[in-house]
Image (cartoon, coloured by chain):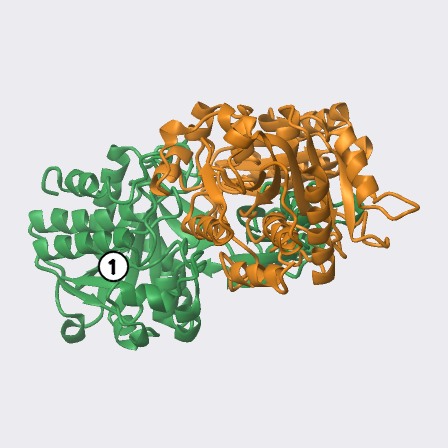
Chain colours: A green, B orange
Amino acid sequence: MPEGSFERMWADLAPVGRHPGTGGYRRYAWTRTDDTLREWFRAEAERRGLDVVPDRAGNLWAWTADPDAAGPGLVVGSHLDSVPDGGAFDGPLGVVSAFAALDDLRARGFTPSRPVGIACFADEEGARFGIACAGSRILTGALAADRARALTDDEGTTMAEALSAAGTDPRLLGRDDDALRRIGAFLELHVEQGRALADGAEAVGVGTSIWPHGRWRLDLRGRADHAGTTRLADRDDPMLGLAAAIQEARSAAERHGAVATIGKLRVRPNGVNAIPSEVTAWLDARGPLDEEVRAVVHEVGRAAGADPVEESWTPTTRFDGALRDRLATLLGTDDRSAPILATGAGHDAGILAAAGIPTAMLFVRNPTGVSHSPAEHAETADCLAGVAALARAIEALT
Amino acid sequence: MPEGSFERMWADLAPVGRHPGTGGYRRYAWTRTDDTLREWFRAEAERRGLDVVPDRAGNLWAWTADPDAAGPGLVVGSHLDSVPDGGAFDGPLGVVSAFAALDDLRARGFTPSRPVGIACFADEEGARFGIACAGSRILTGALAADRARALTDDEGTTMAEALSAAGTDPRLLGRDDDALRRIGAFLELHVEQGRALADGAEAVGVGTSIWPHGRWRLDLRGRADHAGTTRLADRDDPMLGLAAAIQEARSAAERHGAVATIGKLRVRPNGVNAIPSEVTAWLDARGPLDEEVRAVVHEVGRAAGADPVEESWTPTTRFDGALRDRLATLLGTDDRSAPILATGAGHDAGILAAAGIPTAMLFVRNPTGVSHSPAEHAETADCLAGVAALARAIEALT
């Protein structure tokens, strides 16, 4: 790879959407910050002579050659958006590494025998409209265009309005068979979000599967009233249901060998001296087994006294077995293959895999395992090992 | 009273700051909505030939005669701001009734022998900057000007900035001895926020005292992390402390014969798939006895694993005994005095009473007791009975 190509891109992205107070990133879909990121993607593609083609789902695809003419290509890439106050690596590492890997191959004079695409998926985190992997879900039809357009953010802005404001026609939104046909295989590099690689010798691992996971909304309703003058016996305070939900999320997850999190709340009216009329809590639940995750959600709803409303659900996703084995051998040493790991995090790769596209993932070591946090980190040497692994994979697969 | 005077004012105020979705009022201090309300107050004063004098705390005083020349006056009035999604009555009923009572007296040809002032207190609910009765506290020096100027709202705007934006010079903020000297006595009419009057024959009662009450902030700190990939054992999730705080607020209040409420939360980063780094919860606690309220706060802090930060504290406030008895007799029937009641709600009247000003309150019947809610209500006949009672009180006291 040309000296410093990765580092230059990394430095260019570093300030975009970074909150000076928290040090975390606030890169939400279809905002001005998102627009800056997409401009950056287009500029990097142009610098390399790649054609950028948007699809009907708002994702961007930068191609080395026309996949409609030269046949389906190998796509690498990830996303650029973040959770609220997220880290620098989740998403951007995959996009930056894809460009850097292409630079590496070109510097070595390698010419792929089929088109290579670099993907920039829209709205992977779902931080603004509540549905993770919205770009890939719309692309594959897993999320219907009508439902997507009607999703609202916390300010009441619909996705359709946000798309329009960003200069994208929301009427075009929908499953895009042309874009899907161009993807011969998809390979997503991502920072690891756990510690499976942290204590080992290898900086890069190969993904096997994504746990079943979903998001549920708990609408806890009560009656707004004055905090100073309403007797305890006369109260209908939805905070009590919230407390029960939080505690049950932890204990049910322990019982079922899963993880469950209440990380987002909305309180109405949210006044110090007002008993709330409504508390909305979002439950994120995942685990190795579908039925155990379902049991956790059911038990949290029962404890809270509310029916959990399913906002998204993704069953177990297994990546392509042949591709996985080939990458593990390719990236391993003489006497053993690269580490293989499952993950609790959802990814666009999982959505494409569920749509029948041969898909694999590479994970780059995360020393603390911390993710979705400003403390998320990967050593530069490990990131460069990831670029090298990605370049070898592209070389082998094209 | 001139026919329809009360109803006209009530109808004029009805749309100001009303949220079309919730039906509640969002009238926060030093906003454009607040400015509209203050303009309304000035216009009503002007219509009656009253001079409006602001004080150094942002409160407005409309006088029938110059209290600096004619000696301290009797002040009636209340506030126009609201809690988030509050009701129409809490505050405005006292201001509208004050103007209507003056109309009544004038229509009957009564001329007070000392100045009558109508007060419009600023920022009574503390909905924006977190300190209730900020206007009267600054006026009396109970809230230091430096601390007030530095208070911030949820957007990070300081009170000083908000004052400047509203055209009020924040450098002038502070205790105002001139304004205090003009208040011979203060009488605040308010909608009842409980059901002490609801099942009785009388529409108007007289206040005796305000419970000791305060607000505390619980800063619950954890570590942001990915909701899908972080093992339960590795988590430091501040939501669990919140759940303990909510439950202890209820059970400690029951044990101590008090009321305690967690009605406002702030979660960071507040993402569905992120374990929070920080949860901030505000605790409102009140009760008949200071030490029992203190015990509740201590026990909630212990359960949550955080030291409660006191944002405000008001010990028991007793209204002027002689004034109370005189009003109870005046407003009673031949054979018994008007109902006497204590309240768990703080009021500007309590702040003035604590500063040594002879102060009393009148409460107007609330059929459900609900307050700080769009459902807050008082029947028009009861409101008009309140106006009549206020007029009789002004007549007797001036």
Q: Position of residue A30 (x, y in %)?
A: 30, 59
Quarter of the image containing the N terminus of chain B?
A: bottom right
Q: Is A46 situated left or right of B32 in this image?
A: left
Above or below, comparing residue A282 to residue B183 in the picture: below
Q: Nearer the viewer, residue B122 or A28?
A: B122
Q: Position of residue A377 (x, y in %)?
A: 34, 35
Image location of residue A135, percent across then percent down: 34, 63
> Which x, y percent locates residue B239?
58, 39
Q: Nearer the viewer, residue B149 or A257?
A: B149
Q: Which element type, helix, strand or loop, lies under badge 1?
A: strand
Q: Residues within 10 Å of mark 1 (few under 14, many from 20)?
A: many
Q: How many marks?
A: 1
- Tag 1 residue: A119
- In this view, the residue in front, A374 or B19, is B19
Say which chain tag 1 marks.
Answer: A
Picture quadrant of residue A220: bottom right
Q: Do we see residue B147 in this rendering?
A: yes
- Amino acid carrying label 1: it is Ala
Q: Is residue B143 left or right of residue A382?
A: right
A332 to B320, vertically: above or below: below
**Furthest residue in direction right, as rendered:** B335
